[in-house]
Image (spheres, helix red, strand yellow):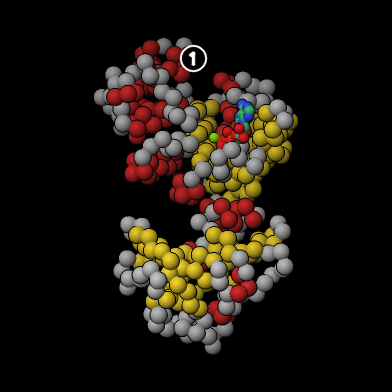
Amino acid sequence: MGYVELRDINKHFKKFHASKDINISIEKGKLVALLGPSGSGKTTILRMIAGLENPDSGEILIDGKVVNNTPGSERGIGFVFQNYALFRYMNVYDNIAFGLRVKKIPEDKIKARVTELLTLIDCQGLEKRFPSQLSGGQRQRVAFARALAPNPQILLLDEPFAAIDAKVRSELRTWLREMITKLQITSIFVTHDQDEAIEVADEIIVTNQGKVEQAGTPQELYKNPATPFVAQFIGNSVEVKNYEQFKHFDKQSDDSIAYLRPEFVSIFKKGESVQFASSAEEAIVEDTIFRGSNIEVRARIHGNLISAIRSINDAEIKVGEKVDVFIYRLYVVSGNEVILETNSSLKDEEVVI
Ligand SMILES: Nc1ncnc2c1ncn2[C@@H]1O[C@H](COP(=O)(O)OP(=O)(O)O)[C@@H](O)[C@H]1O
Ligand SMILES: [Mg+2]
């Protein structure tokens, strides 16, 4: 059994069904991401675990005990809110000490704990500063320390990096992962950013329209999407029409559509690939986008604009150029089923040298 469990949870806001038969199981010490588009019900799930909202039906268990009727303050939970919500008129020290003062812990113990946390978050010497005098990254680390101060067993973080610029956000992700691994605290963080979830989490729970679509490791979700939503949501997928027009792919069923990810595609300059010479097909480049460490090339084929990533070390491809496209595989969605279809020439050694 998981350390945190949600069983058949339903929640309405008036007539709006915000959580639909939610079943979640989270192991002790794991760092789990709740990933889904805005409005898919992530925050609602977090708030129910924290006791800030009550479900209409179903059970929430922590460490094997049903906590539906346990006040949030007694659930052993630390919460880092979406806009880090530090108290603006309190300095760093008082912000971190806040939860301990609520618990009427003696001041000397509070001092020891705040000092320990300031070291942990590498903010020694900043205790007298006010939130407005901190960088975004520092503020977020203080919010993290404040949530950790009362020694919670579970840490909940709602879009913790949303308000922070890209470079610092990336540093903070690594920092958070290291922190949580070190502290071994069961943590659930909400994000709508799949890169963030994939990079940071041990496990991802994908939400969509109030439901859980799939739970698994980032690799599992990536390789074996269980639902059409996950197939198109994870991995910069684009929908392709008439996929049976691509060489070496067969239509699975009349109502099926397909999703393609850039890593399923190679785009070559004419004559560049010997291996796929006979099984590639021609396309015209419509756009090339420099992404810093690589180049995305977009080309039109059978009415679809598809993308592939090329190395900056490869020969340059220009807009309007005729190129060869080879598609390794794609996801075919038919009803509720997702099938990974591989280019049939890859099974045929005559074609692939
Ligand atoms: N207190 C509330 N009253 C009414 N509707 C709410 C309330 N909280 C959330 N909702 C609605 O529930 C849906 C899910 O919200 P939320 O859990 O915040 O989604 P997410 O965090 O994935 O963006 C949204 O459509 C939102 O408008
Ligand atoms: Mg939210």
Residue extending furthest left?
A: 125
Q: Is residue 329 visible?
A: yes
Q: Residue at x 43, y 76 (%)?
A: 323
Extreme residue toward the front, this view? 320
Q: Residue 330: image x %, image y %?
A: 57, 67
Residue farthest to the bottom, as pictured: 350
In this rendered view, identify the residue nearer to me: 26 or 81. 81
How far from the left and from the top, in percent, is residue 106?
Answer: 41, 11
- Picture layout, residue 111 above or below residue 223: above
- Mark 1 falls on what kind of element? loop
Where residue 3 appears, as percent x and y from the top left, is 60, 37
Q: Where is residue 130, by image quadrant? A: top left
Quarter where residue 70 is shown: top right
Residue 335 drawn above or below residue 273:
above
The quarter of the image that holds ligand 1 is top right
Does the beta carbon of the residue at mark 1 sit less than 8 Å from ligand 1?
Answer: no
The quadrant of the picture occupied by the N terminus is: top right
Amino acid beneath label 1:
Lys
Instruction: Give the image location of residue 116, x and y in percent.
Output: 35, 26
Q: Which residue has dot 1 on it?
A: 103
Q: Residue at 56% across / 43% down in the picture?
A: 37
Q: Is residue 115 visible?
A: no
Q: Does residue 179 appear to the left or right of 79 in the view shown?
A: left
